[in-house]
Amino acid sequence: MRYTGRFAPSPTGPLHAGSLVAALASWLDARAHGGQWLVRIEDVDIPRCPAGADAIVLQQLDACQLIADQPPTYQSQRGAAYQQALDRLIAAGLAYPCACSRSEILAARQALGIAPSRHGELVYPGTCRHGLNGRPARAWRLRVEPAAPLAWVDRRLGPQRQDVATEVGDFVLRRADGLWAYQLAVVVDDAAQGITDVVRGADLADNTPRQILLQRALGLPTPRYLHTPLVLGANGEKLSKQNGAQALDLADPPAALQAAATVLGLPPAHGSAGERLLAWTRAWLAH
C-alpha cells in the first residue's frame, strides 16, 4: 500500500511554531517515503473555529511550500460518515447513551473516593453503562471492557502501553452538545483517506490507544504512528494559543522552517524554502 500521510490542524486560529513542527514532520515523512501528503481541516468543534481561520492556515502552509497533493477535506462536512460509524457501534452493543453532566461525573467519582486531578483524565465511572434510569441521553460513549493494557509501538517514542479501561474509561463518541468527538472523527477520516502513517505532536500520543480500540471495533486498519517533539511555552507546557502562542511570522518562511527543523533534530540547511525542504527530505530517514 502506498504511503499516505496527513496534517490535520484544528482551525481555531493561525498556525504557530508548534503547529509548523508537526506540519513539517508529516510533510517530510511523506516525501521521504515517496508517498502522498494530505491536509484535513479538523473543524468538528465548530464553535471554536472562527470564520476564515482555515483559509489562513492553508495560506501559511502555502507560504512554507508545504503543498498537499489533494484539496483539503473538512470534518464539518463529514457528519453522515461519523453517524454511520456510531450506528455500527450501537448495533454491535459497543456504544451506549450517557445522561451524565461533567459535574455529575465529578460527584460520582468523589463518591467512589477518587480525588480530582488537575491534569489527569476524567475517567468515567460507568454510571450509565446499564441504563439511563429515566434520564434523557446527553452523549454517546464507547464501552471499554477491562483488558490487558493496549500495547503499540511509536516510530520515535518506541513501545507504549495504556490500560484504557482504568486510565480513560468509556470515552465520548458524540458530545452532549451534538458535536462529534475528536476520537471518532479522526478514526473514521484516517480510514476513509487511506492514511498509512500518522505523524503528529507528542501531546496526542495518549490518544492513540483510544483510536486503536475504535479502529478494532469498526474493523478499520491501524496506521503507523510517529509523535514529534513539542515546542514549549514560557510556562514549560506545550505551546498553544491558550498559553500565548503567537501566529507564525512568515515574513521569512525559510527561517520559520529552519526553526521547526531544529526542533526535529535536522541539520541546518540553506537557500530557499524549497531548497531546504529538499535537503531535509534527503536527511529525514537517516536522522
Image: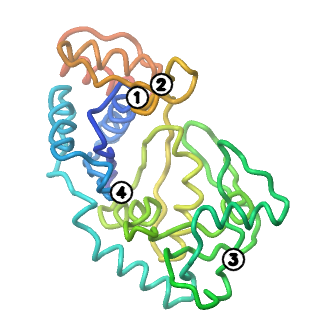
The tag earlier along the polypeptide, 3 or 1, is 1
In the picture, measured across the screen, residue 203 lies left or right of residue 255, that is right
x 44%, y 63%: residue: 181
The type of residue carrying mark 4 is: Ile
Numbered circle sitting on residue 139: none
Q: How many marks?
A: 4
The tag earlier along the polypeptide, 1 or 2, is 1
Graded by Cα atoms within 10 Å as few (under 14), some (14 to 19) or many (20 or more), the crowding at tag 2 reads many
Front-lying residue, 124 or 277: 124
The residue that mark 4 highlights is: 195
The residue that mark 1 highlights is: 18
The type of residue carrying mark 1 is: Gly
Measure the alpha-carbon separation of dots 4 and 3. Answer: 35 Å
Measure the alpha-carbon separation of dots 3 and 1. Answer: 38 Å
The tag earlier along the polypeptide, 4 or 3, is 3
Residue 155 appears at what percent x and percent y? 54, 41
| Residue 36 in view | no
The type of residue carrying mark 2 is: Val
Task: Say whether marks 3 and 1 touch (CB < 8 Å).
Answer: no
Measure the alpha-carbon separation of dots 1 and 2. Answer: 5 Å
Image quadrant in which you'd find residue 142:
bottom right
Graded by Cα atoms within 10 Å as few (under 14), some (14 to 19) or many (20 or more), the crowding at tag 3 reads some
The residue that mark 3 highlights is: 127
In the picture, measured across the screen, residue 34 lies left or right of residue 262, that is left
Residue 2 appears at what percent x and percent y? 31, 55
The residue that mark 2 highlights is: 231
Point out the frontmost of discs 2 and 4.
Answer: 2
Point out the frontmost of discs 3 and 1.
Answer: 3
Image quadrant in which you'd find residue 260:
top left
Point out the frontmost of discs 3 and 2.
Answer: 3
The type of residue carrying mark 3 is: Thr
